[in-house]
Image: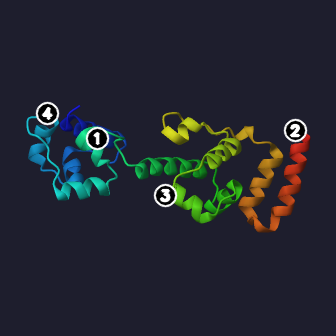
């Protein structure tokens, strides 16, 4: 695949993700002359990376190696982590959890969950599994975004939902002992 074709693919993906609407916005985003864009797309003119292009591609988390050679992924790992983080944040918003109460349920710090949601650090397998267990969310959705988010509200046992509601309403530090006792009762009841 040519550089022009990859640039066109990049434009289509960004448009699909609603990060831009027009070719002019694409040109502004990457420091490309508007008059040359269609020529690049059709390979009538060869695209050569200039310093300002380089900086703009990096700033927008586009993998420069992919643009120039076709090797690797279109976006840097940070960009992919950011997509995952945004989906995790959407799940949290749907369930109406604060970031602190969600972090407590997942067994991570506020800062760690915030950094995961912002794409600054990758999510671990352990945290992914906890999302699946707590919210019955399709992991394909979290990782790829290709599935609809499915959170089965009635899949959480009533006792656990009561504990979660207490966490949201009153905070977690005071209720650790109560939560532990309730979880043990729920576990015993479901065995």
Kind of element beneath mark 3? loop
Q: Determine crowd level at label 2: few under 14, some 14-19, many 20+ residues with C-alpha closer than 10 A.
A: few
Judged from the image, the secondary structure of the residue bearing numbered disc 4 is loop
Question: Residue 183 in the image: x percent, y percent?
Answer: 84, 50
On the image, numbered disc 4 is attached to which residue?
A: 42
- Determine which quarter of the picture holds residue 170: bottom right
For label 3, the residue is 118
Q: Upstream in the sequence, badge 1 or badge 2? A: 1
Q: Is residue 183 left or right of residue 51?
A: right
Q: Circles 3 and 1: CB distance less than 8 Å?
A: no
| Mark sitting earlier along the chain (3/1) | 1
3D distance between C-alphas at marks 2 and 3: 36 Å
| Mark closer to the chain start, 2 or 3 | 3
Q: Is residue 126 left or right of residue 140?
A: right
Q: Say which residue appears at 75% left-offset and 54% top-offset.
A: 164
Residue 34 against residue 43 in the figure, above or below: below
Instruction: Tell me how far mark 1 sits from mark 4, CA to CA.
Output: 14 Å
On the image, numbered disc 1 is attached to which residue?
Answer: 10
Q: Is residue 175 above or below residue 20?
A: below
């Amino acid at each position: 695949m040519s550089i022009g074709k990859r640039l066109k693919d990049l434009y289509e993906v960004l448009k699909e993700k609603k990060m831009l609407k027009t070719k002019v916005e694409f040109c502004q985003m990457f420091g490309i002359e508007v008059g040359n864009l269609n020529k690049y797309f059709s390979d009538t003119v060869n695209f050569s990376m200039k310093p300002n292009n380089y900086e703009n591609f990096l700033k927008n988390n586009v993998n420069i190696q992919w643009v120039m050679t076709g090797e690797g992924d279109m976006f840097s790992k940070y960009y992919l982590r950011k997509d995952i983080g945004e989906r995790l944040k959407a799940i949290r918003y749907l369930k109406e959890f604060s970031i602190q109460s969600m972090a407590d349920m997942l067994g991570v710090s506020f800062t760690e969950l915030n950094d995961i949601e912002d794409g600054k650090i990758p999510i671990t397998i352990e945290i992914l599994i906890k999302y699946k267990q707590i919210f019955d969310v399709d992991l394909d959705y979290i990782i790829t975004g290709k599935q609809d988010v499915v959170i089965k509200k009635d899949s959480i046992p009533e006792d656990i939902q009561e504990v979660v509601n207490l966490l949201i309403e009153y905070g977690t530090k005071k209720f650790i002992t109560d939560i532990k006792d309730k979880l043990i009762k729920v576990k015993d009841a479901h065995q």
